[in-house]
Image (cartoon, grey):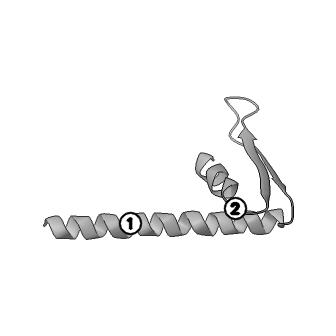
Amino acid sequence: MSVLRETLKDQAGVLFTAYRFPHPLLENPIFYLQTSSTDPVKALQQAADDIIHKCDDLTNIFEQTLSDSV
C-alpha cells in the first residue's frame, strides 16, 4: 500500500492519498485518493503501470548483476 501511495503522490493532479486498516484482523484497507483534474481510476491505472515498470527494471538489474558475477 505504501508503494502505491508514494507512486500516486508523485503524479500531477493528485492532491491527497492515504490508507488505513480499520482493524488489525481485517484484510481490506480503506484507500483514499483525491485528485484535481485527473480521473482517479486513470491515476490508479497509471500508478500500477509505473510500479510494474519499476519492478521489471529491478528484475533486469538483478539478473544482469547475477550474470555478471558468474
Give the percent coordinates (x, y) of residue 53: 52, 70
Which mark is on residue 59? 1
Given the current orientation, which residue lies at the most extreme front position? 12
Residue kind at label 1, given as amino acid type: Thr
The quadrant the C terminus occupies is: bottom left
The percent position of residue 48, horizontal first and vertical second, equals: 63, 64
Residue 17's place in the image compared with 20, above or below, is below
Q: Residue at x 74, y 63 (%)?
A: 12
Which residue is drawn at the image coordinates 29% and 68% (left, top)?
63
Residue 13, image quadrant: bottom right
Q: In front: 38, or 32? A: 38
Can residue 43 be seen at all in this image of the molecule? yes
- Tell me if residue 2 comes above or below residue 8 in the rendering: above
Q: Left or right? Give the position of 30 relative to 58.
A: right
Identify the residue under disc 2: 11
Name the N-terminal-most of marks 1 and 2: 2
Which secondary structure, mark 1? Answer: helix
Characterize the local packing of mark 2: few (<14), some (14-19) or many (20 or more) Cα atoms within 10 angstroms. some
